[in-house]
Amino acid sequence: MQFNNSDYIAIASAIVALCALGTSLWQGYVTRTHNVLSVRPYLDLLISQKRGEPFGIEIQNNGTGPAILISIIAIVNGKSYDLSHEQPLIDLTSILVCKKLTYDATRFAHEARSVFPPTSIIPLLTITPTSGEDQFWNHINRTCKSLRIELRYRCIYGRSYMRLYADEKIQA
């Protein structure tokens, strides 16, 4: 079979077209990966245990994109509490605070699919002792040693993430 100049031009055009297609597909993949990473949420748990200030648990989004909550689970002494509902927050509060003491508590239940914007700090629980501050802090510190909190959330692209906080991260 004999090739003439137009055949060589056609083959070269096909090779260039395939290369352009490959480059376009690769660029699409790279752009999507960049977009996913550029709006990735990163939730942190802030636990305030400073004497003279209220005890507090807050969720902070240090990422560049919104976090969509899946669940917040607290585990104390082997028992789980789903903190997306009010009653488990009340139960956790009663475990954290010695029953003999009086206190004021503010609880914020965040349901599944709640959105945490970037750079936001969202309160979960605040406890202020109204009597026996030394006993309050001693009991909180002992209880926090067995406290584990698991945050499950996803990004706007549907990727799921999980953060686990244990006593070494939240000790006073």
Image (tube, rainbow, N blue to C red):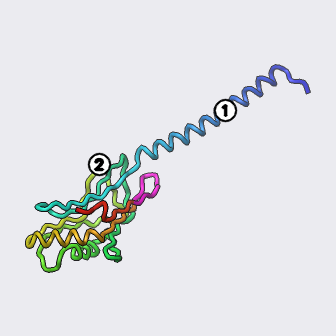
For residue 7, side relative to residue 67 (left or right) = right
For the magenta stretch, what is the residue range? 153-162
Q: Does the magenta segment cover residue 160?
A: yes
Quarter where residue 6 is shown: top right
Q: Nearer the viewer, residue 38 or 146?
A: 146
Q: Position of residue 2 (x, y in %)?
A: 90, 24
Sequence-first disc among 1 and 2: 1
Which of the 4 image quarters holds residue 99? bottom left
Q: Where is residue 69 drawn, in percent x and y?
A: 37, 60
75 or 161: nearer the eye?
75
Quadrant of the rendering where the C terminus is positioned: bottom left
Helix, strand or loop for disc 1? helix
Which residue of the protein is positioned furthest toward the top in this rendering? 5
Are the residues flagged by discs 1 and 2 in contact, CB closer than 8 Å?
Answer: no
Which residue reaches farthest left?
A: 131
Tell how many labels: 2
Q: Secondary structure at mark 2?
A: loop
Give the vertical position of 101 relative to 19 (above or below): below
Magenta span has 89?
no
Residue 19: assigned label:
1
The amino acid on which the numbered mark 2 sits, given as a three-letter code, is: Thr
Q: Nearer the viewer, residue 50 or 111?
A: 50
Amino acid type at mark 1? Cys
The Cα–Cα distance between marks 1 and 2, rounded to whole angstroms, is: 42 Å
Residue occupied by mark 2: 119
Q: Residues within 10 Å of mark 2 (few under 14, many from 20)?
A: some
